[in-house]
Amino acid sequence: MRAVDALEVLELLGSTQRGLVTTAQARESGLSGVDLSRLTDSSKLLRVRHGVYALPSAGADRLQDLRGAWLAASANGDVVVSGASAAVVHGLGDLVPAAHEFTASVRRQSTLPDLRFHRAELSDDDVTVVDGLPVTTVVRTAADLAASLLDSDHLAGVLSAGVENLDVDVEELAQALSPYAARYGFDSGRALLAEVAPGYVAAAIGSAVRTAVTRSPQFRKQALKLLAEPDGAKTLLSFLEERLAS
């Protein structure tokens, strides 16, 4: 196949995959190994990892290697980015995964040293999509890392970032951590979060206030009335401080 035609076919394939294609996908579309070699030798393709190539349209992507690993792994069945790899995707803490981690509903193995598979049943609530990758949610990721006995310092970094995420229900996070709290010397997920994640208490209060505003028209009415007054926000804060201190 002519190089220009081959590249056009590949770009169409990679248009929904952030500019990445697999060898298997290329062959299914009529390209040969020789076609891929020629495009690679002429720098039209960049080999990201075994069986995965980046097209000129790929551009810069901090998750490119992980994305390539996921593409290759998902060819043999659905897999979800999880564990330390999921923490990286979410920007939780400063973990540097030794391998790309994925979870599948069936047992998976790999001879590649940079791939690690876990077997677990994930519900729809356990999975979200970030930058085009299916990944365990912040709550599920934190719980999985706690279950794996991640060291306390790194877990603290993960949890501190997690409670700062406005999309995270901090009470749901606390409940998910509770089964593993004793391993870190705490009697509950709340106690664990309160100790290692400085923003937890503020986030929990904020969550409670948001819930009250959403569910209680009377609370919302009184809060709006107070905020409309001069220094209303300070008055509301003072009220909360007095109630919490009593």
Image: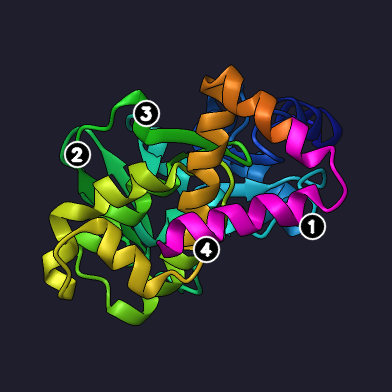
Which color scheme did the rendering employ for the protein? rainbow
Residue 125, disc? 3
Between the residue at mark 4 and the residue at mark 1, the CA separation in whole angstroms equals: 39 Å
Residue 43, disc? 1
Q: Is residue 14 left or right of residue 201?
A: right
The residue at the point 35 percent across, 64 percent down is 193
Q: Is residue 219 left or right of residue 10?
A: left
The percent position of residue 135, horizontal first and vertical second, equals: 45, 42
Residue type (three-letter) at the residue carrying disc 1: Ser
Which mark is first along the chain, 2 or 1? 1
Residue 94 visible in rendering: yes
Specify the farthest residue to the top. 217
Q: Is there a contact, CB below 8 Å, between mark 1 and mark 3?
A: no
Residue named by callout 4: 161
Q: Which residues are magenta?
A: 225-246
The percent position of residue 50, horizontal first and vertical second, equals: 48, 55
Residue 126, disc? none
Between the residue at mark 3 and the residue at mark 4, the CA separation in whole angstroms equals: 20 Å
Is 191 rendered above or below residue 171?
below
Specify the farthest residue to the bottom. 153
Which mark is first along the chain, 3 or 1? 1
Residue type (three-letter) at the residue carrying disc 2: Ala
Residue named by callout 2: 120
Is 161 rendered above or below residue 174?
below
Residue type (three-letter) at the residue carrying disc 3: Asp
Q: Secondary structure at mark 1?
A: loop
* 1 or 2: mark nearer the eye: 2
The secondary structure that most of the magenta stretch takes on is helix
The residue at the point 52 percent across, 63 percent down is 161
Is 62 rendered above or below residue 151?
above
